[in-house]
Image (cartoon, grey):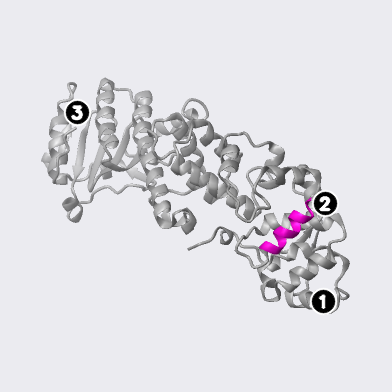
Amino acid sequence: MTNIVDLFPTRFSNIAVRKKALCASRAESLDAESQEFTKIEKSPEEIAYAVLNHEGATLKSFERRALPNLILQSAFDIYQPKFAETVISKYSVRRSFWRRLFNSWLLEFNLSSSVAPLVLKALNKNKFLLPDNVKAVCEKYPILSNKPRFENMAIALISGKMPLADQQTLIFTGPGVVTSKYAQAVLIECVSYLRSQNATDEQLLTFKKLVAPAKNIDPSVKLFAMVGLILGATERNSADATVKEISTVIEENFDDPVTKKATWPSVPDSLGGNTTRQQCLDTVQRWRVFRSITLFFDIIEQVVDSEHKHHFPTRREFWLNYFNRGDVKDAWVILGTKAQEKLISLRTTQMEEFKSLQWAKLSGGPSDQCALLMKVGDITVMEFSHSGRVRMWGAADHQRLSVPRLHRPRYDASELRAECPENQMFRHDSRGRWRIEAQKCLQSLSGRSSKL
């Protein structure tokens, strides 16, 4: 089982003595005075030998100052607990030692480490030597506990009740950026709460601001953003305003859940593993299908110059009914030149939720013509924007006919009018009687009842 501390392991080769904090609020706790980094070139063996056998005589001053940052590094496990005991007993005269050790504990947070009890005992005993802001957060949150519970801390964070100063001291080193395993543990608790509770709009949107304060989600929180935002909203209606806001930021930061599935991050066992990952993919796909169907009818109502516009509400309702009962598995919008121009102009105003939605270009027909390809179970459905016929191809038809495929970037109108059995094409009529035959066809092709 993957442990929390294994999500983003710290390697010895990355160790550096930080001289200036990433944000002013953390400058004191990180004991950083400049933006320069001093790289430690000695190996763990050389440092441990110097500490244990030569009282640090061969270490440079910045290497001795860095010792509290190294105590919890796995590279020193074979020298423990003697290495940690010696460092704490002989190099802890200055207050700066305890500031560094505290930050090292946040960075490497690992309760199963062999030296964790020793470090916690030392920090608790010398807590009075820590900066005032650090002592304050230690009193409020389970930082120096050997059996911490993060639920109250997580609820405070996603409910907007944790002070910004505390967030910057313990969680975020910058807007939407985490660098410590303690922060990861808190975010995992946030995610667990969101996915298991009936999260409120306030909690979901507050969490969104925390992990996605800008357009791009930082890699350090991408996993938490994916699971927390998606599964926190998975039980909501696809038309929900909060879902629209979340789905927009997810689509801006993650690839297509169908064609680019492999690019989505894996999920550790502590958050449900592959089952959770697949649930995220399925939820985002459901949101995308809904918005594709909605976009198709929204855009054609604005650009199609046709006397058949009164057909559109009936057709929208028909296919959304199939979507709502879980039958529409995929949808792909194909736009003519007029619709493309209209959509681009509207994306910055009232059609914000379609800003990151992918779609294809249509050629070979009127400029205001559009199409919608759908997968209803194993059935491929093709809808044109005008008064043409809706076409349906069953699973068996794919073996002998050139059935249009979804997710291509471009289509010619002739491709969408591919050969189709006559009894699987239905012309739209003003009274909506086409729906009766369409339902029968869907039922026949699927082999089960499709009556709405």
Q: Residues within 10 Å of mark 1 (few under 14, many from 20)?
A: some
Determine which residue is flagged by label 3. 428
- Numbered badge on residue 129: 2
Task: Name the residue tied to disc 1.
Answer: 50
Which label lies toward us, 3 or 1? 1
Q: Report helix, strand or loop for mark 1.
A: helix
> In this picture, is 152 found above or below 220?
above
Q: Residue 257 in the image: state x and y as whole percent.
A: 41, 49
Contact flag, marks 3 and 1 (Cβ < 8 Å): no
The amino acid sitting under disc 1 is: Ala
Q: Residue at x 48, y 25 (%)?
A: 350
Task: Locate the C terminus by quadrant.
Answer: top left
Residue pictured at 39% horizontal, 49% vertical: 279
Q: Nearer the viewer, residue 174 or 191?
A: 191
Q: Amino acid at mark 3?
A: His
* Kind of residue at badge 2: Leu
Q: Residue 394: where, in percent of width, then height?
A: 18, 47
Name the residue rendered at 20%, 39% in the picture. Answer: 391
Q: Nearer the viewer, mark 3 or mark 2?
A: 2
- Looking at the rendering, the stretch of residues picked out in magenta corresponds to 117-127
Q: Secondary structure at mark 3?
A: loop
Position of 163 with respect to 42 (left or right) is left
Mark 3 vs 2, N-terminal side: 2
